[in-house]
Amino acid sequence: MSSDWSANKLLKYFYPIFFFIPMNLFIMSAGIGYGIQWIFFRYQATSLGDSVMPLGRGLFYVLSGVMSGKSIFSEILPLVSALVFFAAFLFVLANRTRLSGLLTIASGMISLASSFNQYGITLHGGMGACIPVGSVILLIFGICLFLSKPEPDAENLLVKYDYLILLLGAFLVFSNWATPFFPNDTIGTQLLPYSILENHTFYLDNYPDYTNDILYGFRFYNVGNGHYVSFFPIVTPVLITPLYAIPYLLDIPFTSLTQLVLTHISAALISALAAMFVYLDCCYFSNRKIALLSAFIFAFATDTWALSSQTLYAHGTSELLLAVMIFLVLRNEKQPSNGNIIFLGLCSGLFLFNRPSDSLLILPFLAFVLWYHREKIEYYILSGVISGLPFLGYNLMFFHTIFGGYSMSASRLALDGTTFFNYLGLLIAPNKGLFIFSPVLIVSIFGFWITRKKNTPACRFLQGSVIAMALTVLVYATFDDWSGGNPYGPRYLTCLLPFLVVGMCIFFVHISKIPCNTLITAAIAILIVISVFVQFIGVFYYPQHFVPEQNWYNQWTADNPWDASDSVIIDSLFHKTDIPVLRNDNGTWLKEGSKEQCLTPEIIQLFQNDPDRYEQLCGMKYTPL
């Protein structure tokens, strides 16, 4: 009994250690390099440089045709092994010891098979050599799991901590990126945590490779005396600074590799946390299964996967903050407290300064407090002021405006004859529409329609969110670059996703309570599959355009959102072109001698305000045609 008890305690509380045990140590042939393979990623140092390779990168190599022959198995088998391992981990938490043991054995055998495929039966051959230490340990531990007996009265940790398991699973998927990239409007966000930790300043002067680069330099603002700051809000980089503190305290040098890894881990963690809170939001309206399905759709059937989790756009933080605020409102319905209102205010202040263009989404929260908890309005406002005041001070100090660099783009917003078509484009344009890239979200409309019959505070709150979302879409429809540039899908509307998924969850609950036509169920299932597949294409097939090897003017070309005959989704899947549906429709051409650049209106406005900056970056004077 004692041995069984000890084994099961080890299963539940020490099994996660296998996330950190190396599966194998390997040396490449001809002394090219060496590395370590963990269960979910590998690190290798070669003559070409150091790299971190998540398993998703190997899948990308296979899908894109870079890998062929038996090398395909060397990339796919570790991924299969990791999936089986994670399933074994879940069954351990559920106290299913024997099944977990079998899966652990299978994971170890698959990992060994990958090593044999790559290095031969002797683990030494033309490709190099490896020592599969972790794979052998998995086999031995799996046998121990199978032979041990589960505790009959043990608590099911998988159920108890389901939200944390969802967080972990989503993070592992998100962090296995396929085509890592540096969009120029995220460079400041990536650099600022380093500057805060190393230089104790918000200035980015110590990174001239970026501030003076022709690709990225226009994203930095000269505040005088040679000091540069990012044009973009600093809420996201400030919030992720504690994560960057880990390598800083470990004295890991700041290189392009650490920047890439930390950037993606931060984005993946933010999106995974958002998925967890969306799940908790949906649990208020539904049972665990429907809430889990809704969270799955949020995580993998929307741009949360293809965009927010892949790089450090502020949209991911908007999703997270909005999901947390919805959670606080719903929690306050069950357990009213001053703490809920205070935290709601704190998140509202951060949300306002994270992306000011999303700020109208705060309105339903403000209305909720005013209508149902007016006596606590001072808590909400004061806490919002506390969290927002430092960022307001930053904006006033460096930009002399309330919303910082965003205020400089205010002239690009205009209500004109194109606004209506822009509004429709944000929703249904073939290459940018929200309901094109995530068609399953269409059912959220019916979910919000259902709430009109209910007068509970939560439902009235959601009814108010419909107005806020409609106004937010209108704001983006007034942008001269309403399509959001090159990133895959409707980048600007990712902020709406937590609200939309909650509405979708309500619809799922409604149809689960009535005799449902098989055709309706099948239609919803098809919409989910299509949505996930579209996002899968965005992660593994869509070529990223922000790479130094390209001519710099290619960075500012944009796709035609309305051209259904040249679909970015289909072109990406079949690799019709190296850079699908890229055109110069939205740019203005400038020429001087043999040089020409295609500039977006945003860059044009910057250079008109600061022509010396244009000359500094481009090496020639700003001369519009």
Image (tube, helix red, strand yellow):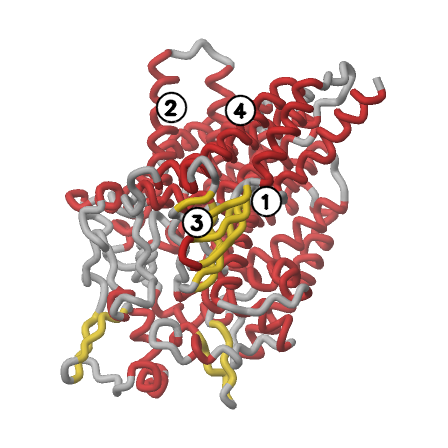
What quarter of the picture does the N terminus occupy? Answer: top right
Query: Outermost residue, top direction?
Result: 515
- Seen in the picture, residue 387 relative to 443 is either above or below; the reply is below
Towards the viewer: 352 or 186: 186
What is the x, y in percent for residue 439?
A: 34, 34
Towards the viewer: 260 or 61: 61
Looking at numbered disc 3 in the image, what kind of residue is underneath it?
Answer: Gly
In 3D space, how far apart are the residues under numbered discs 1 and 4 (Cα atoms)? 37 Å
Q: Is residue 284 visible?
A: no
Is disc 1 surrounded by few (<14), some (14 to 19) or many (20+) residues within 10 Å?
many
Query: Outermost residue, bottom direction?
Result: 225
- Seen in the picture, residue 317 relative to 272 is either above or below; the reply is below
- Seen in the picture, residue 414 relative to 24 is either above or below; the reply is below
Q: Earlier in the sequence, mark 2 or mark 1?
A: 1
Label 1 belongs to which residue?
22
Marks 1 & 4, CB-CB < 8 Å contact: no
What is the x, y in percent for residue 265?
A: 54, 53
Is disc 4 surrounded by few (<14), some (14 to 19) or many (20+) residues within 10 Å?
some
In 3D space, how far apart are the residues under numbered discs 4 and 3 (Cα atoms)? 49 Å
Marks 2 & 1, CB-CB < 8 Å contact: no
Q: Nearer the viewer, mark 1 or mark 4?
A: 1
In 3D space, how far apart are the residues under numbered discs 2 and 1 (Cα atoms)? 42 Å
Label 2 belongs to which residue?
524
Label 4 belongs to which residue?
290
Secondary structure beneath disc 2? helix
Q: Which residue is at a point 43% across and 42% down the rendered structure image?
A: 119
